[in-house]
Image: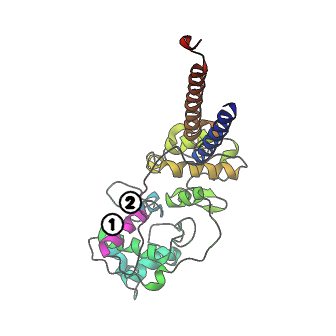
Amino acid sequence: MKLTFLKIFVFLIATVSIYSYVGQLVPQFEEQPPAKKLITVATPPAELAAIGEELVRVKGGCLICHKVTESGNVRGPDLRQAAGLAGRRREGMGADAYLIESLVTPDAYLVPGYPKMMPSAVKPPANMNMAEVKAIIAYLQTLGGAEVSVKILAEDIQAAKAAGPVHKGKEAMATHGCIGCHKVEGEGGEVGPEITKVGAGRTAEELLKKIVEPSVWTAPGYAAGIMPAELGKAIPPGELHEIVAYLMGLSGKSYSPTGAESPWSHEGVRLGLVVLVFNLIMLAALAVAGRADRRPKAEDA
């Protein structure tokens, strides 16, 4: 009997340990991110323009300097007028060609009254491909009230050459426009401070809070309020933790992208402990019941 209980106990410990280990690898949050929209030669103009709008607002970081409504930044030209004036900017150059040039090689022509400050859309920090560039042009054309005339070609959507594995946090920072303002590992903008080693003097919790609540502190030499107050709240929790893990790693510190400082604080581990305690109680109850059955009854004495 004792050998049977011992076998059951060993099996129980092994099972709970496996479940706890697997459970602590799973993030403590659940999210269903929207499916990534792919650009093809058959993408309808309206959908292409919608993708372009998202690129302008997020990955491209365009609204840091431009505006698409009455309120907004005026460091660069008003994007509502971009498509309408494109055909008249440079003599002998069509509207589509000018818009492509203005995104790919913005220094080729500077709109009067504006300085040289815009990075190429196909280089860091945006790192867009030509299909994405044309999606932005489609958005600018609809924004100005014109029909979408830009065309996606097969060569525009060819897969980029593999450049090695990229940390999910770094990828998320590019997706949400972080490196449009901040320089990281030598790439990015200079609107905000360089954050390559920001984790050296900050804890993971402080970085996480700074992203979600930018007003908690301001880097010396930079004005308060530059970082969008709602940006961090729009980033999915999983990507927030990946960003923090990436930044902490650049400073030689470790942080779990699951958001758990210790595996013992993870929901999966805690659930495993609850299951273990429950099963131990059940084993104890079975043991007590077994002893009671083996006791001689009064009438058998």
Image quadrant in which you'd find residue 74: bottom left
Q: Is residue 69 visible?
A: yes
Looking at this rendering, what residue extends furthest in the front direction? 300
Q: Give the range drawn in magenta.
A: 32-56
Q: In this view, does 252 lie to the left or right of 189?
A: right
- In the rendering, at what x and y percent does residue 5 appear? 65, 33
Q: How crowded is mark 1: few (under 14 residues within 10 Å), some or many (20 or more)?
A: many
Residue situated in front as seen by the camera: 164 or 286: 286
Image quadrant in which you'd find residue 95: bottom left
Image quadrant in which you'd find residue 269: top right
Residue situated in front as seen by the camera: 269 or 132: 269
Quadrant where the C terminus sits is: top right
| Residue for point 40% across, 63% down | 54
Give the vertical position of 157 relative to 249 (above or below).
below
- Of the numbered discs 2 and 1, the one sitting upstream in the chain is 2
Q: Check disc 1 and report the residue beneath it.
A: 80
Q: Check disc 2 and report the residue beneath it.
A: 67
Give the amino acid type for the residue marked by disc 2 in the picture.
Answer: Lys
Residue 43, magenta (yes or no): yes
Give the vertical position of 255 relative to 161 (above or below).
above
